[in-house]
Image: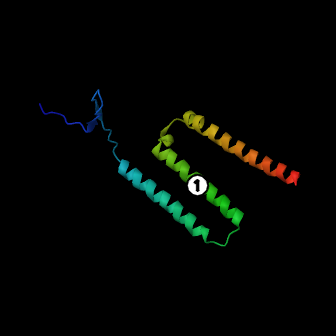
């Protein structure tokens, strides 16, 4: 009977356990696809940086594109795209609420600062 060779490593600690490495077929294709998508968005960001646009509009475009890139990274590398609908929103809803609360705090701070002048 042929001996099965598993890929992995030994932990090297007092227990010296064998940890099997997981092989996901097609992962290289996913990583390269992600690389090219993020590179494309980054090149678009650099290109519009030199466009004659309003500074405030340009800042909002950069914020939106940064959120898109970070969401894509979280979706791919933290496997959030492959989760169930309810679990996705269990993670995303608190994040959205925190960003909303920060926005409200900044807006109120600017308003109160303007009144104090």
Seen in the image, is 77 located left or right of residue 58? Answer: left
Quarter of the C terminus within the rendering:
bottom right
Seen at 67% across and 58% down, the residue is 60
Quarter of the N terminus within the rendering:
top left
Seen at 62% across and 41% down, the residue is 95
Seen in the image, is 111 located left or right of residue 52? Answer: right
Q: Is residue 37 above or below residue 85?
A: below
Task: Residue under label 1, please give it.
Answer: 66
Seen at 63% across and 71% down, the residue is 51
Seen at 50% across and 62% down, the residue is 40
Q: Is residue 72 above or below residue 10?
A: below
Q: Is residue 31 above or below residue 81?
A: below
Q: Position of residue 98 (x, y in %)?
A: 67, 41
For the residue pair 41 and 114, the one nearer the viewer reads as 114
Seen in the image, is 105 located left or right of residue 39? Answer: right
Labels in figure, total:
1
**Label 1: few (<14), some (14–19) or many (≥20) C-alpha neighbours in 10 Å:** some
Q: How is the image coloured?
A: rainbow
Residue 49 lies in quadrant: bottom right
Q: Position of residue 87 (x, y in %)?
A: 55, 34
Q: Position of residue 4 (x, y in %)?
A: 18, 34
For the residue pair 112 and 99, the one nearer the viewer reads as 112
Q: Position of residue 65 (x, y in %)?
A: 59, 57
């Amino acid at each position: 009977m042929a001996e099965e060779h598993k890929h992995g490593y030994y932990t090297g600690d007092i227990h010296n356990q064998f940890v099997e490495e997981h092989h996901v077929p097609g992962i290289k294709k996913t990583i390269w696809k992600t690389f090219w998508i993020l590179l494309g968005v980054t090149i678009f960001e650099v290109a519009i940086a030199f466009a004659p646009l309003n500074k405030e509009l340009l800042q909002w475009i950069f914020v939106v594109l940064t959120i898109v890139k970070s969401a894509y990274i979280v979706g791919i590398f933290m496997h959030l795209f492959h989760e169930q609908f309810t679990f996705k929103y269990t993670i995303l809803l608190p994040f959205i609420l925190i960003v909303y609360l920060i926005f409200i705090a900044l807006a109120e701070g600017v308003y109160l600062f303007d009144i104090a002048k």
